[in-house]
Image (cartoon, rainbow, N blue to C red):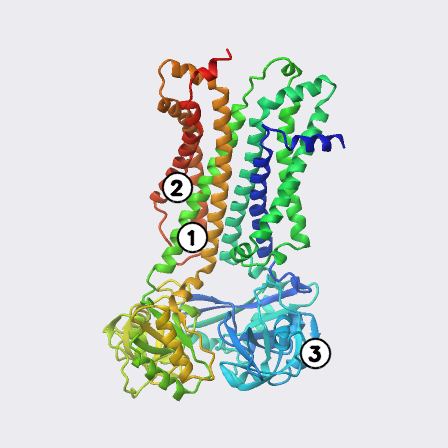
Amino acid sequence: MRNITLARRNLFKRGQNNGIKILSLGVGLAVGLVLTAKIYFEQTYDTFYPDADRICKIQENFSVNGEKLEGGTVPGGIAPGLKNDIPEIEAATRFTPLEEDNTRFVIFTADRQRHTGKVILADSCLFDVLPRPMISGNAKEVLSRPQYVLVSESLARSLNKGGDPVGMTLRLDNYADVELTVGGVFKDIPENSQISYDVIISMSSIAKFIWDGTDNWYANDRYHAYVKLRPGVRYETVGPAIRRCVEKHLDEAKLKERGTELCYYLLPLTDIHKQSPGVRHMSVLLGMLAFALLFTAMMNYILIIVSSMMGRSREIAIQKCYGAQGKNITGLILTETLLHIGLALLLTVLLLTLFRGMTEELLSASLSSLFTGTSLAILLAVCLSVFVVTGLIPSGLFSRIPVSTAFRRSTQSRKIWKRILLFIQFMAATFLIILLIIISRQYDRMVNDRPGYNYERVVYCTTDGAKTSDRIKALEELRRLPEAEEVGSCSLLPVLTGNNGNDATLNGRTLFNFEDLDMVDTGFVRTMGIKIIDGKMFEASAPKTFSVMVSRSFAEKLALTAGWHDGVVGKMFEINNYTPATVYGVYEDIRTGKNRMDEHPTIMYHTNWSSRYIVIRLQSLTPQAIRQVSDVLKRMLPDKDIVVIPYKAEMAYLYNDSRLMRNTVMIGGIITLLIALIGLIGYVRDETNRRSKEIAIRKVNGATAAQVIALLSREIGYLALPATLLGAGFAYLAGKSWLEQYPEKITLSPWMFLAGILFTILTIFVCVTLQSWRIATENPAKAIKSE
């Protein structure tokens, strides 16, 4: 109790800089603890499912003419087939997103109230493998009935204003002719799940929306399939049984003749997310950032305490004269540290409350999902570690202060301690600044680099569910707009795709796998500025055969595997062995999704009809022009929910994770640099006070203010240069590792590291100059008059 009273009194004593200590520690804890919680959040994806350790996803490995490919989706018949043939599997299920995995559909109620949500088609066994608590309805019964759906709790509240929506009818904007009936409500999927949906449509309704491939063992690989193993069964031991099952249902010899080999295997559900390259790199980077922030904050706290030792040594020595032992001094310092950490944690809570929105956006997770029972226990352990480091080191130093200090002035400056702590802070700041440069350059490369087409001034709109005749009229009206430079339509946008599609075949032999961009009209290629390098662009006149345009890499592979030495234009091949196609033209490789330009060959099919996406290149991308386009589409498609989106916004969203990581590192770097500068200011102030008489004598002997500042700066420079070089070395290793996840990456130029080092050193020298200016310019008589 006595230590608590003394610690509370010391809190407001002058010269101890407790406010700065608590502020720097609080800010460091706020960012460091949130990042630690984020890492735990990412590492515990899908662990909320009961028996999560028994749930596995069916993965697919296949090769086409020796080219190995891997996919997370499989044909529709795989999951139920494995369940029927393998006794070690307790339950199996499969589902498929109605469109791309992250598509949010516009959902209308019977009274045309608008809502949005992610939609999947799933079989009746979904909740046998991936269960969610039901609020109302029976999941198995609902998912067995055609045109019945389950909705999430949050969507249910929105649909019926808090009431039970069971029995309500819904329609998807893209499939307005299909009426769906709500049959039940399930608890929302937690945020740390790779499987996310708001509406589950019964699989028996699939033919109303898309082609029914639920019984396929080959092709139409669009289904996410999961199995639940029986207790005690290890997923590795099921591999041979899966192999036998595939051999039973597929003619592998025939597939090999065509150049195709297939293999299915199980991957534990809880490993899928955390073992993905992007998550691994992100977790390592966030871990480094959290450690750098927490360590810098701790070192700065200790530095400030060490700096105050000269002023506090006599107080500690007097306490020893009155009988205080080392354990008493240690207890007092630990109590002060505990009080400071407690106040720093209160500041942490305040900062997180004030900046909650920004924090949740940067981390793509709500604070309530980040701070759970288990994560709070981990964060408490982190705080305990901070307490041990910031408490034991200063208490050890104070407890060794000799009693004689009470009778004479202490001359111990603890200079070595201060320099070590400053060295660490400079190194951490340089590390984060250079890392920020690397991440920013890579983000700019991804967003601004041309993906093989020109999307500047391009906007698009989805018109699913609209009549073809209405779409054609809309296209005609858009072409009349003075704001529209080019207008076209397509089935898939390059930015929104990025998965393997079909096989190119010739005379029954599989040549290679390619990415299918599906149907485009004559205006699409012009609108997107895609460069034709051979043959010609699609023409409006309908061809006699199925006409396609292929990418450069497609043409090169086709010519090589087919043995054509005079090019591919005008040649015929098949798609999946049954659709003959004639190459009309060859275009330059384009990037789809996040893929490398030449990673997946692409193909476009010609159509004279309007497809689901309408794309418009505007004369200028202005709000007025976008509004004009929107007005035309709303007038021509009155039953559609029209949203006109700049293509550039989709490109930016595609790399949103990198943008958020850049911003996170930027905030962490700024905070680390500020904490380091706080420590530097304290160090320079202590040094100038300690050496005030020396500096005064130098000035009396003719030293100028510039020479005094240079003297202090030179000592800091000897410390800063190796620290920044070491920080740059760590940044190189971290940056190189982080860039591995990108198919197209920047070169780690020495200029990036030189810029980061120079910026850090320049900031340090400016800080030193400003802090030492007073002593360098004041009258030397003030410092030596007391002698």
Q: Residue 571 appears at what percent x and percent y? A: 28, 79
CA separation, marks 3 and 1? 47 Å
Front residue of 508/77: it is 77
Q: Amino acid at mark 2?
A: Gly
Residue 336 picture location, percent across and down = 67, 33
Q: Which residue is mark 2?
A: 756
Q: Is residue 573 visible?
A: no
Q: CA distance from mark 3 to mark 2?
A: 60 Å
499 or 239, which is in the foreground? 499
Per the image, label 2 sits on a secondary structure element best described as: helix
Disc 3 target residue: 138
Q: Is residue 632 left or right of residue 570?
A: right
Q: Which residue type carries mark 1? A: Leu
Above or below: residue 509 compared with residue 406: below
Number of numbered discs on residues: 3
> In whole angstroms, how far apart are the C-alphas of marks 1 and 2?
18 Å
Which image quadrant is residue 726 in?
A: top left
- Up-down: is 18 above or below 228? above
327 vs 262: above or below: above
| Quarter placement of the N terminus | top right
Query: Callout 3: helix, strand or loop?
Result: loop
Report crowding for label 1: few under 14, some 14 to 19, many 20 or more residues within 10 A (C-alpha): some
Contact check, label 1 and label 2, Cβ < 8 Å: no
Disc 1, SS: helix
Horizontal side of 194 relative to 766 (left or right) equals right
Q: Position of residue 436 (x, y in %)?
A: 43, 48
